[in-house]
């Protein structure tokens, strides 16, 4: 079973709070929930809407068609009426429409009766819970624990009144629960905190800002230093300083902010200082669409920074993936002393989803700092070794040893050198680390059949919509399977080659216009896709759209 | 005939002076000259050396082996003696006692007699001039272009004294000289000036700085604003402003400076603002090797900037290319309203080469600016949808009643912020459509050697000279080998390489980077199989000799 | 020739100071009789930076922190255009800090209007370079821990020839200040207080109203020391008006061919004009 509720209105009408309450409540009623927000780049006015989907099995994305539309303004009704399912309901205040086909209630009046017209959305919430056929207790508890004390009573009263105003129209049972409700950015921050990240600096940039503000929130409690810096150039340079001094450090941004970090990324490559950077992608170029979603920075992430140095790029596929991969990123960056770039996107960052509680006990922290004896004499920060990885120590920890880093080409001590042979050996050393990393990269997740007739390829947050679409197609009897890339550079090719050898069709699905994953497949595996399903309108794939477009091309 | 003189010493000793005098004198005696320059990143001390190669035939690369070493320091001898030909000569000051195989000259004591230590290089130059029986008049004229007044007199004396020190060994017959001698950055600057650039802003960064300083020197004469800006982030933003206001604008940097321009590059993509940006490559990452050479920014430049937008990337192959392609870049940038990035390399920015005089008559200036707004009294649509994706472009302040709005957000045809799905899709399509027109104008890579070779070498940018030399010599020896050297490199032209690649038995890439970036492009765009690769990434330029020896190793192995 | 400026529907919150600033801008440009096609508003990113979309001038809405470089490029290319650089305090004093400092050094003839609401508006309430120390924000949960920038003192110290402060709550004064800034031959720094009704609950309209006072008629704005003192006055009383105004040579006047010649954009372009340069290479 599967329901979707859409709440729409102008910014400032209380939609966010209502959605938060509803989402939490539905989760407490035992459902798998996915909340997706669509908002404009403004602080007041305009049109925003939020969709909450819930089901008795894990859901990863939103549906185009919805069961209930709760319209806070008239524009919402006009814009979204076409999306209503067959037995769907449009709920609105009586003042907004004459259409008797809609469920029009005296929501504002009722709120006034309860004590405050601003509690109108709680009246609506009460009505929705009743329409679904659920009991009120869980929802009331959520209101109690979420809202400020001063307004709890009014809202509970408003909720109850709303509850009484309607009769159940759907039959939703209460189930067992024990999951958490979380969004992608918070999951990333948790992963970082769990992995011992104690330095996070950044500059506010939608949609990456909430990683920073989460870290800031836990700052006192966990002892994490956070800073809003003057610009993104400073952010990465500062984080590298912290990492040099021995603290696990991270920074993040989006689009243009990441672009400003290109020079310092190259710096990270030559000084071989560990760092984790997150790019929460949004549509570009330049300022583009600040509050929308896209995955068009893949090639940019892989090649950013002048000169050549090894790096790793990991695209985050779901909120769960975000937690574990972020934690893993810290181990990898310290093991190989290379920068690790995480690619998320607005859709994943802001989408709230129910997942199994994260298992913090499964996180290992492997600092890979040198323990034991060091050779006599001056410390060689860039000691040439078989693996290319030099033993790393922290300044101020070992008497008699100082650590010199340098952005020029350097010798083993870190001193400037121009010698041709030293240059060559240093480039080879650094590159060896990248080769070694290739042995550790994870192949993409397999969804559905391993060697299907129709092989789908995707990366990052496309995982969710693709997983659901594959399920639907399999149910209809198609031979279909998908590879969802997480680790994406160095580019894993084993499963791809295996699947491609027997597939009749390879279908590339991406949220960009240039099919960047397809380019990687050609370059590293000499495999090209037969069909491409590309979306670059600033919105994510809902399950319906992807399913329909796939139906057109699958064999 | 083919001769190479190596001059080496510490920074500050005047090596450049000797080289300059030699270049001019030999060139004006009618010979082709190619000077390979090697600097350290120091202002005083260290070891720098230059190799002046000259011949009666055109030269496009340097020789590994040299005929003469003129050493200003003793360590010069130690560094380079291994490259001296068997019958080669080493000249150095008498104070360095190196035995009878060396030519010891009283350079310092002569200078002392003349009364100025700084004329030591000129004394040496005088000696070398005598070795080759160079015309003293030509030499003195060259001196007169470098020195003035009393200093000139001292240097003329030094020249004569040096001349008297030795005997002529090879007599260079004087021939007609109608060429120019120039380096890549000078040629690039000339190309920009010819194309009507009126605004250059930049930040000093080796090896791009000399483009800016050349244009700055001509600023008054040619009416060009040159602004040394506070940082590279500002540089490209400023150039975009100038371009918006209707002037041809340009900026340039190297590695790290270019990295700071990446956000503004994305800006130029969405503003659809023409601009030309130079990346004079040097070895990275980060500060890397400031005065050395590499071509390791190819993928970086191609994918620079977040989001997706059309851009063109041209790799400059030699000074002629630097002149003509730069001028062409401005026309293309304005025609398609895209950023055009020119990639050059330290090697080419510094080496001096004799070439035919650049033909300014071949340069055309095509502004692609619309005459008037379409439709009376209608608000101007800066981003009007058109069939080919290129909107008619007007300049602010020129037409009464017409205001021009450009915007870094996604926008509608007027340039106003617009978040709708329809507009987003249409605008993305519009911008990317421009690439199709551009693809028709792309120039295929330069084809060298055999028309249909068994062995196909592929390279890009400044390896052109070395490939030209290597392929000619190998063809001469009977090998079926040819080369494709890319200039226009993004969008990536694939016709020629597909044609030759299908028939070739082995495709071997030649690059000055470690990860084989051109190779990765070939794989991605053609999926041709690459047999092997010749990669040099120690900060020094590859030459014809090295390509030949590496190729032989590959073919034997 | 009509000098009326069209206005378009903004996405600013009701009560935002930007509305008043836009009103003053329109009035100033119209009173100065500058035709719309000759005016350019160059902005970075933020709510203030959306100005070019909402008033019918030429517009260049670029990157965050990067309004000044393009503004300079535009002015140098066509000295006949009236160039106004405009953005918020975060964009100008934070992300664009380096350009702020060095633009003043040049003294290009542009007017620089900074919408100073002492908070980040568009990105929802983080501290900005002019937010007070200790103020709690949506990101600095236990208060800002660094001292604010002193923008007027900074521009004075850097040698700006025109330094002024306005307030969105006093449109008549703002109109006059804008006119003066636009007419001033050189870089004109006008910092404009405005309340951010949604995100800044400290520096509200009333807060500003209670503190701002106009500099008296007899105030000598050629006195640097007096100006410097006034620029640091930021407690119970904050002065508005022109703090400092002296004549200085502009950057563009130091390029002979720009000063004496036609606008750069009108220069005739002919490749053969450059051929003479080849002589140095023979």
Image: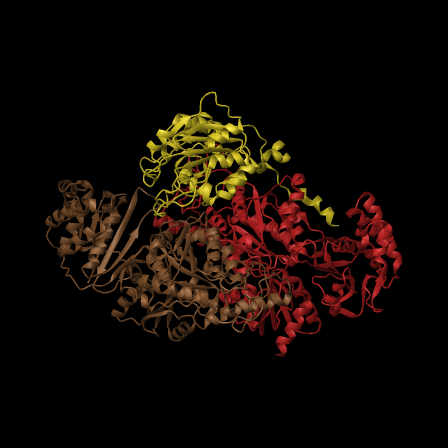
Which chain is the one coloured red? B
Q: Which of B66 and C235 is in front in this view?
A: C235
Q: Is residue C85 left or right of residue A70?
A: right
Q: Colour of chain A?
A: brown
Viewport quadrant of the C terminus of chain B: bottom right
Q: Nearer the viewer, residue A537 or B242?
A: B242
- Name the residue furthest front: A399
Colour basis: by chain
Residue B370 visible at all: no
Which chain is the one coloured yellow? C
Residue A423 visible at all: yes
Please give the name of the residue rendered at 38% of the width and 50% of the height, measured from the top-left corner: A206
Instruction: Residue A119: give x, y in percent of width and height.
Output: 19, 44
Instruction: Residue B439: give x, y in percent of width and height.
Output: 52, 56
Looking at the rendering, which quadrant does residue A456 occupy?
bottom left
Q: In this view, does C131 lie to the left or right of B285?
A: left
């Amino acid at each position: 079973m599967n329901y979707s509720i859409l709440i729409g209105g102008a910014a400032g009408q209380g939609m966010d709070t209502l959605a938060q309450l509803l989402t939490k409540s539905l989760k407490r009623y035992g459902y798998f929930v996915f909340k997706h927000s669509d908002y404009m780049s403004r602080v007041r006015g305009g049109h925003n809407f939020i969709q909450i989907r819930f089901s008795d099995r894990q859901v990863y994305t939103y549906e185009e068609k919805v069961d209930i539309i709760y319209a806070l303004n008239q524009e919402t009704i006009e814009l979204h009426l076409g999306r209503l399912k067959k037995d769907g309901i449009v709920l609105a205040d009586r003042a907004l429409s004459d259409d008797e086909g809609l469920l029009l209630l005296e929501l504002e009046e009722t709120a006034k009766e309860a004590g405050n017209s601003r509690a109108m959305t709680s009246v609506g919430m009460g009505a929705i819970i009743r329409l679904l056929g659920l009991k009120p207790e869980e929802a009331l508890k959520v209101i109690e624990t979420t809202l400020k004390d001063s307004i709890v009573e009014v809202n509970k009263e408003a909720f109850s009144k709303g509850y009484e105003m309607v009769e159940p129209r759907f039959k939703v049972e209460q189930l067992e629960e024990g999951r958490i409700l979380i969004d992608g950015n918070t999951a990333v921050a948790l992963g970082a905190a769990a992995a011992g990240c104690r330095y996070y600096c950044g500059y506010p940039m939608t949609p990456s800002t909430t990683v920073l503000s989460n870290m800031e929130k836990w700052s006192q409690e966990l002892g994490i230093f956070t800073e809003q810096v003057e610009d993104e150039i400073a952010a990465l340079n500062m984080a590298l300083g912290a990492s040099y001094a021995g603290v696990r450090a991270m920074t993040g941004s989006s689009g243009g902010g990441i672009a400003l970090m290109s020079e310092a990324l190259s710096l990270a490559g030559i000084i071989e200082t560990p760092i984790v950077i997150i790019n929460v992608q949004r549509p570009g170029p330049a300022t583009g669409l600040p509050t929308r979603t896209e995955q068009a920075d893949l090639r940019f992430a892989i090649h950013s920074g002048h000169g050549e140095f090894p790096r790793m790029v990991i695209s985050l596929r779901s909120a769960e993936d975000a937690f574990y991969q972020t934690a893993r990123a810290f181990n990898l960056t310290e093991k190989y002393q290379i920068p690790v770039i995480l690619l998320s996107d607005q859709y994943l960052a802001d989408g709230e989803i129910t997942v199994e509680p994260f298992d913090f006990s499964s996180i290992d922290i492997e600092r890979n700092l040198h323990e034991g004896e060091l050779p006599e004499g001056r410390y060689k920060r860039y000691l040439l070794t078989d693996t290319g990885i030099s033993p790393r120590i922290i300044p101020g920890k070992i008497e008699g040893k100082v650590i010199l880093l340098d952005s020029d080409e350097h010798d083993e001590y870190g001193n400037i050198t121009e010698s041709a042979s030293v240059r060559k050996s240093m480039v080879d050393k650094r590159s060896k680390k990248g080769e070694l990393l290739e042995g550790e990269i994870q192949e993409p997740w397999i969804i559905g059949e391993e060697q299907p007739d129709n092989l789908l390829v995707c990366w990052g947050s496309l995982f969710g919509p693709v997983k659901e679409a594959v399920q639907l197609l399999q149910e209809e009897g198609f031979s279909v399977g998908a590879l969802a890339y997480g680790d994406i550079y160095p580019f894993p090719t084993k499963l791809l080659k295996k699947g491609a050898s027997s597939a009749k069709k390879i279908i590339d699905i991406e949220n960009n216009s240039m099919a960047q994953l397809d380019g990687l497949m050609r370059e590293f595996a000499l495999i090209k896709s037969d069909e491409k399903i590309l979306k670059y309108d600033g919105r994510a794939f809902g399950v319906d759209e992807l399913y329909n477009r796939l139906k057109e091309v699958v064999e | 005939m083919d001769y190479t003189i190596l001059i080496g010493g510490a920074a500050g000793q005047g090596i450049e002076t000797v080289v300059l005098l030699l270049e001019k004198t030999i060139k004006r005696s009618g010979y082709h000259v190619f000077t390979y320059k090697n600097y350290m990143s120091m202002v005083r001390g260290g070891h720098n050396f230059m190799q002046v190669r000259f011949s009666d035939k055109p030269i496009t690369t340097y020789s590994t082996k040299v005929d003469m070493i003129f050493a200003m320091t003793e360590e010069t001898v130690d560094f380079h003696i291994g490259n001296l030909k068997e019958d080669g000569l080493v000249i150095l000051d008498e104070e360095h006692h190196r035995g009878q195989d060396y030519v010891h000259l009283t350079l310092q004591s002569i200078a002392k007699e003349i009364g100025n230590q700084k004329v030591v290089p000129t004394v040496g130059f005088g000696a070398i001039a005598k070795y080759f029986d160079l015309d003293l008049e030509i030499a003195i004229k060259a001196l007169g272009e470098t020195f003035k007044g009393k200093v000139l007199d001292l240097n003329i004396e030094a020249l004569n004294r040096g001349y008297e020190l030795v005997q002529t060994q090879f007599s260079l017959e004087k021939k007609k000289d109608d060429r120019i001698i120039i380096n890549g950055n000078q040629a690039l600057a000339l190309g920009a000036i010819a194309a009507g650039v009126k605004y250059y802003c930049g930040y000093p960064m080796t090896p791009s700085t000399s483009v800016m300083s050349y244009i700055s020197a001509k600023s008054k004469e040619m009416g060009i604003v040159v602004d040394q800006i506070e940082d590279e982030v500002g540089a490209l933003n400023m150039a975009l402003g100038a371009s918006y206001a209707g002037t041809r604008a340009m900026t340039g940097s190297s590695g790290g400076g270019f990295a700071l321009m990446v956000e503004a590059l994305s800006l130029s993509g969405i503003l659809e603002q023409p601009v030309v940006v130079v990346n004079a490559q040097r070895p990275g990452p980060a500060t890397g090797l400031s005065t050395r050479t590499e071509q390791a920014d190819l993928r970086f430049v191609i994918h620079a900037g977040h989001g997706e937008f059309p851009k063109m990337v041209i790799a400059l192959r030699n000074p002629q290319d630097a002149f003509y392609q730069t001028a062409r870049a401005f026309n293309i940038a304005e025609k398609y309203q895209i950023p055009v990035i020119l990639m050059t390399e330290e090697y080419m920015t510094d080496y001096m080469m004799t070439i035919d005089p650049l033909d300014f008559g071949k340069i055309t200036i095509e502004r692609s600016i619309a005459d008037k707004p379409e439709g009376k009294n209608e608000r101007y649509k800066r981003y009007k949808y058109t069939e080919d994706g290129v909107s008619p472009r007007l300049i602010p302040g020129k037409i009464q009643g017409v205001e021009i709005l450009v915007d870094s957000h996604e926008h509608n045809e007027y340039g106003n912020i617009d978040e709708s799905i329809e507009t987003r899709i249409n605008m993305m399509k519009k911008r990317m459509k421009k690439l199709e027109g551009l693809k028709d104008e792309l120039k295929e890579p330069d084809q060298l050697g055999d028309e249909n070779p068994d062995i196909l070498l592929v390279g890009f940018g400044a390896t052109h000279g070395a490939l030209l030399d290597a392929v000619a010599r190998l063809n001469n020896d009977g090998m079926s080998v040819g080369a494709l050297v890319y200039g226009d490199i993004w969008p990536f032209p694939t016709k020629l390489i597909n044609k030759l690649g299908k028939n070739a038995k082995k495709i071997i890439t030649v690059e000055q980077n470690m990860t084989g970036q051109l190779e990765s492009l070939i794989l991605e765009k053609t999926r041709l199989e690459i047999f092997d690769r010749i990669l040099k990434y120690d900060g020094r330029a590859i030459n014809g000799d090295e390509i030949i020896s590496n190729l032989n190793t590959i073919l034997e192995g | 020739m009509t000098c009326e400026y069209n206005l378009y529907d903004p996405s600013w919150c009701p009560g935002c100071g930007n509305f008043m600033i836009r009103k003053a801008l329109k009035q100033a440009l119209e009173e100065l009789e500058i035709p719309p096609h000759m005016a350019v508003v160059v902005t970075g990113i933020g709510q203030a930076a959306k100005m070019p979309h909402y008033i019918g001038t030429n517009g260049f809405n670029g990157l965050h922190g990067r309004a000044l470089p393009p503004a300079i490029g535009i002015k140098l290319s066509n000295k006949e255009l009236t160039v106004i650089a405009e953005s918020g305090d975060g964009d100008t004093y934070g992300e664009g800090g380096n350009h702020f400092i060095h633009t003043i050094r040049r003294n290009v003839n542009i007017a620089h209007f900074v919408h100073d609401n002492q908070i980040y508006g568009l990105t929802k309430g983080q501290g900005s370079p002019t937010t007070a120390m200790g103020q709690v924000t949506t990101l600095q949960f236990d208060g800002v821990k660094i001292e604010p920038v002193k923008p007027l003192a900074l521009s004075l110290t850097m040698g700006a020839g025109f330094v002024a402060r306005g307030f969105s709550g006093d449109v008549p004064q703002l109109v006059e200040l804008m006119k003066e800034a636009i007419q001033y031959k050189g870089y004109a720094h006008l910092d404009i207080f405005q309340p951010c009704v949604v995100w800044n609950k400290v520096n509200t309209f009333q807060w500003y109203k209670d503190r701002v006072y106009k500099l008296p008629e007899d105030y000598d704005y050629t006195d640097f020391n007096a100006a410097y003192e006034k620029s640091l006055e930021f407690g119970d009383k904050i002065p508005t008006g022109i703090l400092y105004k002296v004549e200085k040579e502009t950057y563009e006047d130091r390029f002979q061919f720009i000063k004496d010649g036609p606008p750069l954009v009108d220069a005739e372009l002919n490749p053969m004009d450059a051929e003479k340069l080849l002589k140095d290479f023979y």
